[in-house]
Structure formats: C-alpha cells, structure tokens
Image (spheres, helix red, strand yellow):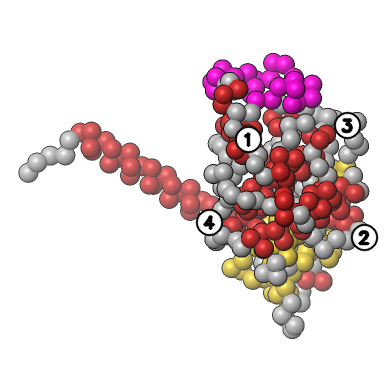
C-alpha cells in the first residue's frame, strides 16, 4: 500500500486544524448570539410597556454597540424594533456611542423626517438602555447582497438618503457613519437613516473632531490624511460611496483589509492628493508616504477621467471637502438626468 507523501500529510493536518478552528469560531459566535438574545428578551420582559409585544426570535441582529430584536404586538400584529445597547462601561456610566445615539434620536423625535428612523420610546433598566424604533424590513446592505436593484429604485434610495442627510445637516448634525448597513429599507421603496452612535454637532471648520470616524470603506480622504477640522461634508463622501455601490452591483469604491489598502484604492481611482487639489496638504503622514513609496505613483497612473465620468461623482469625491456639494444640492442634481450614471467604469 502506497504511503501518503509527508508534505501531503502535513497539508491535510493543517487543513483539518483550520476546519476545527473555523468550526469553534462559528460555534462561539452562535453561542454569543444566543446569549445576547436571551439577555435582550429578559431585559424587555421587565418593561411594562413592552409586555404586549412578543419577540420574533428568528429575527435578531447583534451589532457592536447593541442588540436588535424584532417584536410583534399580541393583538393587532403591528411590529416594532427594540435595540438594547451593550453596556461596555457599567462603572463609569453609559458608553459615549449610546449617549450620542439616544441624544440624536430624541432630537429627531421632535424634528421628524421621513428618511430618519423614528424612536418611539426609551427605557432604562438597571443601567441598561433599551429604545423602541419603527419597524423596517432590513438594511440596504442586505438588500444589495440579495441581487441587483432596479435603476428607478436605486435612484429613489439615493434621493431619500440625500434628503435625510440634508435634514441632519440643517441642524448642524453630521452622521459620520453612512454606509449601506446603517440605511434601512422597505419594499415601497422607503429608506431611513439609522445608527447615530457617531453623530455629532459641528461648526464649520471650527471644531476639532476625531479622525477615527466613518467605517473604513466609506471614509473620506481628509480622515485618512488626519485632518481633524472637518465638517458635514464627510457624509457627502460616504454617501457617494453608497451611490457607487448602487450603480455597480454592490462593488465597493475603496475596499481593502487595511486603511492603507483603502487609501491606495482611492489614489488609484482619483489620483494623488496634491497642494493643488487638497487644501493644506499635510506633511509626514505615514499612510501618504507609504503610498508614495509602495505605489510609485506618477501622473501617468491618473485614472480620475475614467472613474469620474459621472458629474455627480466628480463633485462628491472632490478632495477639497469645502467644494463638495451640500446634501440638498445633491437632491437637486439627482432630479437632473445629466447627473445620472451612464455606464459603469468597473
């Protein structure tokens, strides 16, 4: 009987170990998910106003800062969404993300907009915070993974996103985490902005903010270049990234496993930031220097004329954030077919 080569045996062993490791990770994830589900159900059972609602156990989302549970009314069948915030710092009070989200949703409860998620109520039980929200079917991210979206539906989503952001910005509130997973949709089609855990008030160019904002794939150039004096125009760049995915079957504009990867992808598509196209270009920024040395970028690599054929992208992906259009201006341009995508560059 012929023996397996030693290299083959070693490969099989490594493969088996990897399978066991992946299986353990999956089991741990499922256990954590079930534990969070049980804890959430236990928490809402202590809320008098929620006793008329039954949890729909098969619909559950465990996020970084909270656990989402869909519930149905016992009598009339109406649905709501409960969000229980994970308490990362019980001794020193609630997490800053909790305070920001609750504060923003309380504000928009008084200043409503059809494209911003509505909060019905807020409950605090034993240092835990639970909020009840209007029901939506799912996220835009999930919707895009299910298949292509019709042009008219995508255009409607774009307009509603711009309209919702325009409402936020009219009160000097920037969202700072616009992405498909933070946009909820229904079949109508209806879109609503949610997850305000990074939302913050701003004053034009006067406030200093953290650059650790916006999910990496939707992060604007100024945050990669560590500009702390930004404003609501970070949301315009992130919104452009969402538009891009809607126009290109879910393909990300600047996907990567690291910030450096994403920055290089931006440079590949839009060109290198220079003193001509970027205000006060900073010096000695590691991500910029590494891109210059690794990528060996020259003007011959400039593909912006390909990726910025669409006039709206050319405005929204402007390196100078001061020159990006407002969300209201984006709404107005979406009414003009001149700013609609003509062909996909990817």
Dot 2 or dot 3, earlier in sequence? 2
- Which residues, given as a range, are shown in magenta? 272-296
Foreground residue among 211 and 29: 211
Residue that numbered label 4 is attached to? 30
Q: Quadrant of residue 232?
A: top right
Q: Is residue 306 left or right of residue 277?
A: left
Other residues around mark 1 within 10 Å, as few (<14) / some (14–19) / many (≥20): few
Other residues around mark 2 within 10 Å, as few (<14) / some (14–19) / many (≥20): few
Residue at (65% x, 22% y) in the render:
288
> Relative to 286, does residue 21 appear above or below in the rendering?
below
Of badges 1 and 2, nearer the viewer stands 1
Residue that numbered label 1 is attached to? 305
Of badges 3 and 1, nearer the viewer stands 1
Residue 21 in view: yes
Q: CA distance from mark 1 to mark 2?
A: 44 Å
Of badges 4 and 3, nearer the viewer stands 3
Instruction: Based on the picture, tell me whether residue 43 belongs to the magenta stretch.
Output: no
Residue that numbered label 2 is attached to? 110
Residue that numbered label 3 is attached to? 205
């Amino acid at each position: 009987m012929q023996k397996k080569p030693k290299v083959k045996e070693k490969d099989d062993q490594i493969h088996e170990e990897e399978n066991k490791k992946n299986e353990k990770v999956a089991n741990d994830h499922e256990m954590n998910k079930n534990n969070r589900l049980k804890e959430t159900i236990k928490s809402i059972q202590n809320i008098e106003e929620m006793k008329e609602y039954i949890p729909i156990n098969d619909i559950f989302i465990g996020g970084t800062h909270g656990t989402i549970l869909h519930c149905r009314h016992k009598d009339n069948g109406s649905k709501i969404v409960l969000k229980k915030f994970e308490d990362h710092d019980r001794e020193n009070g609630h997490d800053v993300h909790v305070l920001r989200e609750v504060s923003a949703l309380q504000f928009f409860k008084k200043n409503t907009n059809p494209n911003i998620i509505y909060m019905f109520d807020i409950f605090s039980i034993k240092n835990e915070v639970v909020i009840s929200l209007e029901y939506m079917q799912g996220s835009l991210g999930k919707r895009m993974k299910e298949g292509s979206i019709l042009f008219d539906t995508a255009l409607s989503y774009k307009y509603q996103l711009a309209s919702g952001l325009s409402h936020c910005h009219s009160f000097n509130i920037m969202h700072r985490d616009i992405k498909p997973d933070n946009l909820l949709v229904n079949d109508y089609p209806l879109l609503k902005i949610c997850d305000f855990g990074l939302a913050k008030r701003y004053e034009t160019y006067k406030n200093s903010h953290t650059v650790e904002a916006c999910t990496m794939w939707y992060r604007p150039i100024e945050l990669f270049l560590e500009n702390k004096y930004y404003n609501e125009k970070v949301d315009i760049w992130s919104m452009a990234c969402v538009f891009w995915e809607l126009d290109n079957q879910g393909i990300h504009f600047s996907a990567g496993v690291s910030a450096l990867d994403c920055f290089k992808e931006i440079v590949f598509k839009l060109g290198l930031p220079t003193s001509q196209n970027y205000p006060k270009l900073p010096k000695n920024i590691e991500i910029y220097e590494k891109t210059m040395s690794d990528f060996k970028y020259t003007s011959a690599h400039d593909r912006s004329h390909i990726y910025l054929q669409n006039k709206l992208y050319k405005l929204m992906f402007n390196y100078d954030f001061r020159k990006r259009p407002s969300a209201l201006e984006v709404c107005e341009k979406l009414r003009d077919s001149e700013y609609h995508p003509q062909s996909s560059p990817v």
